[in-house]
Image: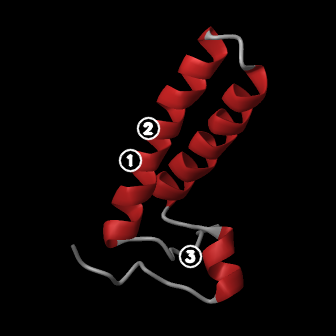
């Protein structure tokens, strides 16, 4: 089973960078005892990271967007 790609180019790089940023926020928040913020940031990081790695976004598909043909 192959997932159709609809994320690419600059969009993929931005998602990866945001995933790293949200991971840092999550870890910082969890260390400070702010579990709600840490959990939300961790979920956002995981979602964006999965999008960047798999090159697929369900929201893009629902909206009919395809950035996989974009070049950098």
What crowding class fits label 1: few (fewer than 14 Cα within 10 Å), some (14-19), or many (20 or more)? some
> In the image, residue 56 lies at what x, y percent?
56, 67
Q: For mark 3, what is the residue?
A: 4
Q: For mark 2, what is the residue?
A: 20
> In the image, residue 37 lies at what x, y percent?
70, 30
Q: Residue at (43%, 80%) from the top-left corner?
A: 67
- 32 displayed left or right of 54: right
Q: Quadrant of residue 40?
A: top right
Q: CA distance from mark 3 to mark 2?
A: 24 Å
Vertical relation: 56 (above or below) 49:
below
User: Which residue of the protein is positioned furthest toward the bottom in this rendering?
Assistant: 64
Vertical relation: 59 (above or below) 66:
above
Q: Residue at (46%, 56%) from the top-left corner?
A: 52
Q: CA distance from mark 1 to mark 2?
A: 5 Å
How many numbered marks appear? 3
> In the image, residue 27 lies at what x, y percent?
56, 20
Viewer-nearest of labels 3 and 2? Answer: 2
Give 31 or 60, whichever is nearer the viewer: 31
Vertical relation: 67 (above or below) 53:
below
Helix, strand or loop at label 2? It is helix
> In the image, residue 45 lies at what x, y percent?
57, 41
Q: Quadrant of residue 31?
A: top right
Helix, strand or loop at label 1? It is helix
Marks 1,2: beta carbons within 8 A: yes
Give 6 or 33, whichever is nearer the viewer: 33
Helix, strand or loop at label 3? It is loop
The mark found on residue 50 in the picture is: none
Q: For mark 1, what is the residue?
A: 17
């Amino acid at each position: 089973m192959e997932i159709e790609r609809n994320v690419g180019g600059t969009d993929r790089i931005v998602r990866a960078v945001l995933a790293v940023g949200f991971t840092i926020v999550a870890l910082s928040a969890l260390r400070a005892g702010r579990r709600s913020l840490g959990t939300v940031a961790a979920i956002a990081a995981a979602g964006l990271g999965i999008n960047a790695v798999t090159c697929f976004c369900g929201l893009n598909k629902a909206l009919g967007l395809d950035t996989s043909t974009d070049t950098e």
